Image (cartoon, rainbow, N blue to C red):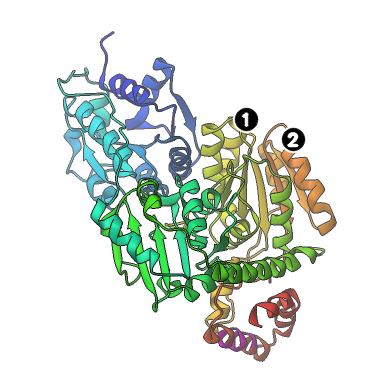
Amino acid sequence: MAKNVADQLVEMLANAGIKRIYAVTGDSLNEVNDAVRREGNIQWIHVRHEEVGAYAAGAEAQLNGLACCAGSSGPGHVHLINGLYDAHRSGAPVIAIASTIATFEFGTDYFQETNTIKLFDDCSYYNQVAATPRQLPRMLQAGIQSALHQKGVAVIGLPGDITSMDAVEINTSTQNFNSVPVIRPSDADLQKLSALINQHQKITIFCGIGAGEAHDEVVALSQKLHATVAYSFRAKMDIQYDNPNEVGMTGLLGLPSAYHSMHESDLLILLGTDFPYTPFMPTDCKIVQVDIKPERIGRRAKIDVGLCGDVKDTLTALLPLISQKQDDSFLKAQLKVYADVKNKMQTYVDDSGEQDKIHPEFVASVLDKIAADDAIFTVDTGMSCVWGSRYINATGKRKMIGSFNHGSMANAMPQAIGAALARPGQQVIALCGDGGLSMLLGDLATIVQYKLPVKIIVFNNRSLGMVKLEMEVAGLPDWQTDMYNPDFALVAQAMGMKGINVKYPQDVQEAIAEALAFDGPALVNVFTDPNALAMPPKIEFEQVKGMAVSMTKLMLNGHMDEVLDTVKSNYKHLKDLL
């Protein structure tokens, strides 16, 4: 039988290293589905929702380098969008196959017709429709190259009638070239940078995910300079471990120590970061920025020196030019602040809570202690991110994936699916909020169907916790943030996985240990305190004022019980105000 376009597509994907396609099959996608069945080297992962497939592909790409998802005409395309936005903004190389209506129906407002060029334009680097068999292999080749080297999404629109046509061989390349160049500033720029560094004594290095491959070089530079090292959430697992000069994260989920160090510095060195929260950046010190994408330089802070380069390559060339500093007083002072912050954080763990109001800090701390050294964590956007960022520690082998740039709810469970398939030998743990898990609950069945040993820890605070906090800080009484939840443990059991409810603090460690040891998927539904707050690293007077106004409004409206619950749950945060 002659090879058709669907066969050619699957063959090229397999040659590019694609191991699986996350998709819901149907109509225009069916020929591709059948080609996957016949080819035999690619696994078809039948998700319940295409958004889950896109999230899973994004997680796999972040761990293994390239992944693929697909959606069929119309609704299947639209369902992909949120997960593809997340993958694109996370720099995950993902190929999305968007099968469309037949070419002869284009432009007729046909059933399930969507304009894929317009639809995917904002969440892709490459986005084309193959309207003839001759176009498909060249477009797919270009899309794969674009995804790999621009680090993002490539969308291939594929009409259903084209997939069954005879394939056309092309004279251009169908091989993928994944070369890794050395990229660093010029010698003159490096001399300029080293001279500036040698002039300053109080230095903080702030690392983003772009510094993730340069752990040893960052540590070496910090020790030469007696500089502190702060980092973004995405960079934590790559930078925190075996780093004697680290002072934690900054940003909305960060710690006062990192914020304090950056603002006490006379020189701040930004490495591989596009950190978006400008209010957390100092304005009265010299700032250096090194980024492999020079168009990012200076858009988050007032930069004095901006250089284009890969962080590892740049630091390798820079280190021989740097003189060893002798004065370590700044470093010692900032490490003392960090030690004090960690002591305060421990008080949140030591007080584990009460029935149905288990403190989430305690849950995350227990999980950190008993999870594997090479565990992969996925974290839902919102309060789960807070507890993961502050209490799950790096080991040099652990990974943490979340919707850190796109900030979408419901990401953790789908990303855990991709992580478990990408790294079958590693423990995969999803830290889910009850709101996030509820959004895409049906794909628990996908976990069971493919026998993925994913462990889901539900921080069940019966509310949209982060939104509640945002409203209270703004001086608004929280409204419509409460959640009516099913019994998630029973839902898990109905789906075919182990389900455990935890209502008492003394049962947390045993339940999590039981789930992690279980041979198969498991869900632990922990009833956490709905009034637990996550104080930012710098507490503004307006935030305190807003919280006071919010509490006053609640009292005036007869909700004194809620005010008392909030005060009792967060007495610990009084330490942060001192």
Q: Is residue 188 visible?
A: yes
CA gap between label 2 and label 1 equals 12 Å
**In this figure, what is the number of numbered marks?**
2
Element type at mark 1? loop
Circle 2 crowding by C-alpha within 10 Å: few under 14, some 14–19, many from 20? some
Of residue 460 and residue 361, the one placed in the foreground of this image is: 361
Q: Which residue is mark 2?
A: 518
Q: Which residue is mark 1?
A: 451
Q: Amino acid at mark 1?
A: Lys
Q: Could you tell me residue 38's position as x and y percent?
A: 40, 15
Q: Is residue 440 visible?
A: no
Q: Amino acid at mark 2?
A: Phe
Which residue occupies the extreme top position in the image? 1
Relative to 284, say whether 87 is above or below: above
Does the magenta run of residues contain 548?
Answer: yes
Question: Which residue appears at 75% of the width and 46% of the height?
Answer: 512
**Residue 352 circle label:** none
The residue mark sitting in front, 2 or 1, is 2
Residue stretch rendered in magenta on the structure = 545-551
**Type of secondary structure dominating the magenta stretch:** helix
Which quarter of the picture shows residue 93? top left
Does the magenta run of residues contain 272?
Answer: no
Q: Could you tell me residue 213's position as x and y percent?
A: 45, 44
